[in-house]
Amino acid sequence: MNALDRKLLRDLWRMRGQVLAIALVLAAATATFVLSVGVYGSLTETRDAYYARNHFADVFASMTRAPRSVVARVGEIEGVQRAEGSIKQFATLDFPDRNVPVRALINSVDEFGRTQLNQVTLRAGRMPHPGEAGEVVVDEAFAEANGLGPGDSLEALIYGSRQRLDIVGVGLAPEFIYSIAPGDLIPDNERYGIFWMGRRALEAATDRTEAINSLALTLERGASQEEVIRRIDRILDPYGGTGAYGREDHISHAFLDNELMQLDAMTRVIPPVFLFVSTFLVYIVLGRMIRTERTQIGLLKAFGYSGRQIGWHYSKFALAIALVATLLGSLAGIWMGQGMTRLYAEYYRFPFLYYHISPGVFLAASGLSLGSAGLGALGGMRSAITLAPAVAMSPPPPPVYRAGAIEALGRRAGLSAIGHMIVRHIARWPGRSAITVLGVALSLGLLFSTMQFMDSSRTMLDSFFFRAQRQDLTVSFTEPRNEDVLFGLAQIPGVLRVEPTRAIAVKMSNGNLIERTAIEGSAPDSMLTARIDSSGAEIPLPVSGLMLSRQLADQLQVGAGDAVHVEMLGGRRTQRMLPVAGIVDEFIGARAYAAPQTMEALARDRAPVASALLRIDPAARDAILTELKEMPVVLGVTERDAALLKFKQMIDDNLFTMMFFYVAFASAIAIGVVYNSARILFSERAHELATLRVLGYHRTEVGIVLLGELALLVVAAVPLGCVIGYWMAQLMTAMFSSDLFRLPFAPSRATYGYASLIVLVAALATAALVALRVLRLDMIRVLKARE
Amino acid sequence: MKTGGTGAAFSGKGLRKIYVTGETEVHALRGVDLAIEAGEIVVLLGPSGSGKSTLLNIIGGLDRPTEGELFYRDLRLTGMPESELTRYRRENIGFIFQFYNLIPSLTAEENVRLVTDIADEPMDALDALELVGLGERAQHYPAQLSGGEQQRVAVARAIAKRPGVLLCDEPTGALDSATGVRVLETLERANRELGTTVLIITHNAGIAAMADRVLHFLDGQIARVVENENTIEPGEISW
């Protein structure tokens, strides 16, 4: 090892605190990068492999009832590779010891193993045998949540009749990576399961011999999905087809896609912040190092080292930091990625989830750290290269201070001599002061923009669960009923109020923009539902025309006063132009609302009741649930409180974990920035501080010179950080919003306060740590030497 | 605790200072007895490493002896806690160093104010600058002053709080003779007009001629003390 490299190692060791502080910030960049890109890659690869292996379909369609022969007709459409028909039937399950309603979606599978699309992967047991009536395979999540396995059996109410189901296997399918019950927001594995039953058995149970109600198909490469869908719709029209749709509208696929999009958004926003800060930290630290070592640089040049050799020597210092950071960050990224993958595995069910990070990710991550540190080293390198040896070996000229604009303010404020020292030093090094302020502000911004997701969820929760949904129970029926069913429900003791709701599945279009959605209606005097916009105001249903959620209006690019083409899916397939009467800024889903008369005019029937909303006496809850379970017309019951609890639990699981990481990351920035600023400040001012001590200033008074400047900069960073945070949070909520839901942007004042407090504490604790050095200040040694 | 009259300013007995660096011990002071009268000008002469600076630092409360006792008037400096030593410096001692040690971010006047801000009955900062002949340059920053001017600001800063004692470590070491004389004149004037006790460390034997007493240092001890019958004015010093 040559002497310069030895110097490098010793410098790194001597400045280990600062090196580590920068490395931590850079490591946070690497970690978030490795985490998000790694998990994104793993999830995408796993999904694609799963889709390919189990032949996940490209297009899906459902209908009321069609003869099986329709499958062959669809298969003949140009561009269709393979089509398969099946039966999908909702059933209610009876757990004798539980009164909470449990629903299952039973899918038919070919008993002879001829099912090619959306294949089931068995995790335990076997597929149903041909001719065995009650044999089912249940999905793994449901089996785990309810402690079921092969050999267990269940009582089910299928299509109006009771049947015993024998579990023969546990499985998974690519159609149900993410499975939520209709009307739910998040999976509830205890109350909703996916079952597979032999085709003949399900045909018999649902009175659909040689008939189907669901279609899935794959497309040939290069086929036009749009054209295929158009032709399928034409074929299925007489059978109550509700419109074919592609993967993008498939609920499981869409949720997974949404998750991937959020990961991608994270990659694009968060690592750049860390990289940016690290670059500046390297810049100021190396700059200071070269200023203090100018005599050595002059000497080396006098000995015959070239400018390039010396420049390279100092760049290696920066690159060494980047290497340490890449190593730390990659390890942290892998560790966090494993945790995150485990978290995903709870909500997204894969038969295998490979957590695998390609070497390319690490290469890219190290490239980013090296690039960021290298960029920061450029300034210092340039000054090391251009320093003339004769100039370098003479002491640097004393820094020139001038009374500037701040000065006038200071004089008016009656600053003490110490006050002047602080203010002038800031003004003397405006670049470095700005970097400190910006660095701390960015740390605050990052912290705020992640912490406000809590506010966002809380607002969504409040608006959705407490203001928009005021019912205790939602009762869905096996098929639409007339209003008599409401009287039946109202008879149950403890039921305080019953209201009908209905939804019509439609295809809504504006020009060539088409969206599949539902128009929802409620009773004109409804007390249990309301439409709440993002400002919390309750929006009444329009007398005529439609009210679209902001999401839907954006997708269709329409506003109030425009008209949209509405085509009913199924039923009478009415088509008409309806005016958009208003837009409601909602958070969840792309939906439309209409008054009952508008719904009736569209459906051209006397509004049948698809589901009912109930307000109940909490004391009678158990009895009511038991009663509902006994009613054959009831398909399922959703409890608002249970859903709320699930939602809260998901927030706790995901957000709190994320929050922990981000508090750590944001603190890393604040600590990195403040520690380096403080160390540089201390080294620049050690001489002055010692002079003050000699003149009779106490340690605490001298500490103020050091802490005062930092405190001023950190405090100045708070409002800037709040502005940056506000801006970043808006960007991030927009990037995290999807077709499925929009995140409300509703930061609370407390969040500004908490974020500021965390950053202030981290910053001041770090500064105080450096200020402790004032205690060990060697007055005599400092004064003996010329600065 | 302000002084200015007569009587003992400092009295010390058996002062020793041992620095331990790694495995070696350096005996900087090897038993020094000391008596300095208030209002005296004392010059400390001797080769490098003979213990002059160590003694001055101990007298100034910047360092502590390993052994021995030291009194400033009736104040026992040895064994004093750090905070009291700071207060002692704040109230009684003015320092002047070879390299001025001005705060570059403060103007001449503000550098003086740094001391008057925390002193009990200080002079006006501008008066102190007038006293060293720099009234005109009060608003200049150190970088805008010559070496001699900077040292005179340091002197003004030291005398502005009307200290009982001025401790000067090579005050003219970095100056040319004409500038050096101006600085010495200022010190002499402070001694004459304010009754300040002045201790000066120097390598320049010529300066000894203006002292009431000269302490010659050798190997950590005071080798001899020379009383000056006829002190001369700084202007007459042969450089």
Image (tube, coloured by chain):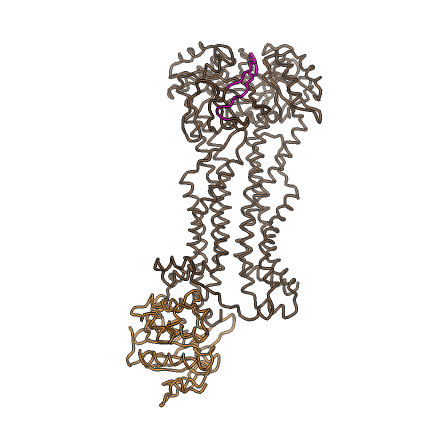
Chain colours: A brown, B orange
Find the magenta span and give its range.
A559-578
Position in image of residue B135 (x %, y %): 37, 72
Which sits in the foreground, A617 or A52?
A: A52
Position in image of residue A284 (x %, y %): 53, 57
On screen, A406 above or below B27? above
On screen, A771 above or below A602? below
Position in image of residue A274 (x %, y %): 54, 47
Residue A451: in magenta span: no
Q: Residue B217 occupies which quadrant of the picture?
A: bottom left
Q: Would you say residue A249 is visible in this rendering?
A: yes
Q: Would you say residue A97 is visible in this rendering?
A: no
Q: Residue furthest front?
A: A561
Position in image of residue B205 (x %, y %): 45, 85
Q: Residue A342 occupies which quadrant of the picture?
A: top right
Position of the N terminus of chain A, as image quadrant, is: bottom right
Q: Residue at x 35, y 57 (%)?
A: A413
Which sits in the foreground, A705 or A586?
A: A586
Q: Residue at x 53, y 61 (%)?
A: A288
Residue A572: in magenta span: yes
Which sits in the foreground, A303 or A661?
A: A303
* Number of marks drawn: 0
Q: Residue furthest bottom?
A: B229
